[in-house]
Image (spheres, rainbow, N blue to C red):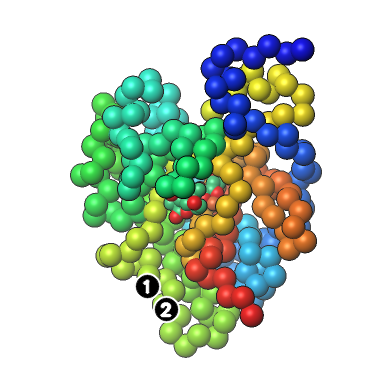
Amino acid sequence: MVLLPKPALEQFSLIRNIKPTTFFSGIPLIDLSNPDSKHLLVKACEEFGFFKVVNHGVPLESILKLESEAVKFFSLPLSEKEKAGPPNPFGYGNKSIGQNGDVGWVEYLLLTANQESISQRLSSVFGDNPEKFRRALSDYISAVKKMACEILEMMADGLKIQNRNVLSKLLKDEQSDSVFRLNHYPPCAEIQALKDHDMIGFGEHTDPQIISVLRSNNTSGLQISLNDGSWVSVPPDLSSFFINVGDSLQVHI
Ligand SMILES: C=C1C[C@]23C[C@@]1(O)CC[C@H]2[C@@]12CC[C@H](O)[C@@](C)(C(=O)O1)[C@H]2[C@@H]3C(=O)O
Ligand SMILES: O=C(O)CCC(=O)C(=O)O
Ligand SMILES: [Fe+2]
């Protein structure tokens, strides 16, 4: 018999018997520096709904700077982090995800990706060196938005849509409702000691947006569902981004 300490027991609803999945080797790879990739990109969206991008132009320095600021933020005492909550509509959240009562072993910062409104609302997020966090966030978001616009324009080209900005303009718009999310999945030693059990980080869902840009920061855990309904693990990567086709882009024929 395994005795769980009380705090772990309190999280019992987050423990699931998850079948370990093997790393999936069939994720489409798109080289953004090659304009011919637009056909592969459209094929990946239509047939797979998920792909990996390389040569994306987001500087590794900017990626690592934001990661280091994020690690600092999540290392703060809970009482400090909670000053930046609740996450409705934007801010720090812990275990509760979204408005429907979903829970996960995750803490996060949900922010607007709109540069105009990002900093004023969340001054408490930026800790004792606000400028450093603000700059890292702003550089990262600008670079990722640029890449996302490039992807959306390649997609429009690949679909032979005359106005190649038709999708990217939604992201460029000052009123864009794009969101930025920093997810932190804390370790849970008590549960990891239990065989055949794992924690649900961020439960099964689809993203409502056009596309989601994900970074794995070299850490495994992300799983996707294939067309046949099976779940597979995405091999993590330090510098690539993963793109998930959201509900708004998906058209059922
Ligand atoms: C559990 C949920 C959180 C989420 C809304 C949802 O019901 C399913 C999708 C989730 C997601 C993923 C992408 C974005 O981070 C997000 C803001 C969104 O629009 O859809 C989150 C939602 C959320 O955190 O509220
Ligand atoms: O943290 C992740 O890798 C994925 C989380 C996710 O699916 C999301 O934020 O929509
Ligand atoms: Fe998601």
Q: In the rendered image, which residue does mark 2 sit on?
A: 166
- Which of 186/203 is in front? 203
Q: Tell me the quadrant of the picture where the C terminus can be found.
A: bottom right
Tell me which corner region of the image, top left, top right, bottom left or bottom right, holds residue 145: bottom left
Tell me the SS state at disc 1: helix
Q: What amino acid is found at the position of numbered circle 1 in the picture?
A: Lys
- Residue 26 is situated, as x and y percent measured from the top left of the image, at 76, 57
Tell me the SS state at disc 2: loop
Residue occupying image coordinates x 46% and y 37%: 96
- Residue 220 is situated, as x and y percent measured from the top left of the image, at 65, 39
Q: Tell me the quadrant of the picture where the N terminus can be found.
A: top right
Residue occupying image coordinates x 57% and y 64%: 245
165 sits left or right of 161 in the view: left
Label 2 crowd (10 A; few <14 / some 14-19 / many >=20): few
Tell me which corner region of the image, top left, top right, bottom left or bottom right, holds residue 166: bottom left
Q: What amino acid is found at the position of numbered circle 2 in the picture?
A: Val
Q: Is residue 231 visible?
A: yes
Residue occupying image coordinates x 63% and y 60%: 51
175 sits left or right of 25 in the view: left
- Which of 198/27 is in front? 198
Vertical relation: 199 (above or below) 253 = above
Disc 2, ligand 1: is the CB inside 8 Å? no
Callout 2 touching callout 1 (CB < 8 Å): yes
Tell me which corner region of the image, top left, top right, bottom left or bottom right, holds residue 87: top left
- Which of 207/184 is in front? 207
Disc 1, ligand 1: is the CB inside 8 Å? no
| C-alpha distance separating marks 2 and 1 | 6 Å
- Residue 21 is situated, as x and y percent measured from the top left of the image, at 77, 43
- Which of 55/235 is in front? 235
Vertical relation: 237 (above or below) 26 = above
- Residue 221 is situated, as x and y percent measured from the top left of the image, at 65, 40
Q: In the rendered image, which residue does mark 1 sit on?
A: 169
